[in-house]
Image: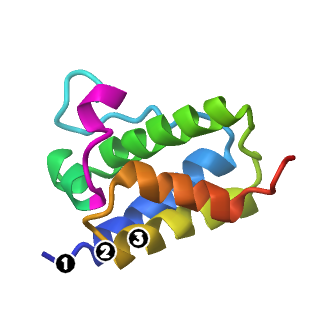
Amino acid sequence: MNIRSPFVVAGLAILIAFSSGGVYNARAADQQQPYEPTMEDVSHLSCEEVWIGVAEKDDAFLQVVELFAHHILTRREVKFPGTPEAGKAFGDAVVKNCLADPEELLYSAVNRSLRDTLPVNE
C-alpha cells in the first residue's frame, strides 16, 4: 500500500487545523455522527493502522492526531502556537515521521513531531 499521498493530504489538514488555532470539526460526507476517537481506542495503533482504520478519511485521521497532540500538550502544560509556521512545521513533521515508519505508533510520531517543532519551555 502506498500511503505517501494520504499522509501529505493529512499534513495539509493538520496545517489548516493548527494554524487557525481551533479544533477541526468537519464530518466525513457519509457519516451521520462525527468520529470521536478515544485514547483507549487508538493509542495502541500505528500510523498506518489509524489511516486504514478511519477508512482513509482525512478528517477522521486528523481527529486522532489532534487527540494525541492535545493529550501530550496538556500533560506538558504547553500551548500550541496558533501560527501558520507552527502548524506547517508540525504537519510536515507528522507526515515525515509516519512515512519514515508507517508501523510506528501514531502517538509516538505525534509526540516526536511536537518535540521537534515546538520551542522548549524550561
Q: Of all residues shown, which one is farthest toward the front?
A: 122
Do the residues bearing badges 3 and 2 touch, measured as CB atoms within 8 Å? yes
Residue at the spot of label 3: 8
Residue at the spot of label 2: 5
| Mark closer to the chain start, 3 or 1 | 1
Residue type at numbered disc 1: Asn
Residue type at numbered disc 2: Ser
Residue at the spot of label 1: 2
Q: Alpha carbon of mark 3 to alpha carbon of mark 2: how far?
A: 5 Å
Do the residues bearing badges 1 and 2 touch, measured as CB atoms within 8 Å? yes
Q: Secondary structure at mark 2?
A: helix
Left or right: 42, with 31 as reference point: right
Left or right: 57, with 95 as reference point: left
Do the residues bearing badges 3 and 1 touch, measured as CB atoms within 8 Å? no
Q: Quadrant of residue 40?
A: top left
Left or right: 56, with 80 as reference point: left
The residue lying toward the viewer, choosing from 32 and 81, is 81
| Residue bounds of the magenta highlight | 37-47
Of the 4 image quadrants, the one containing the N terminus is bottom left
The x, y position of residue 56, in whole percent, is 21, 55
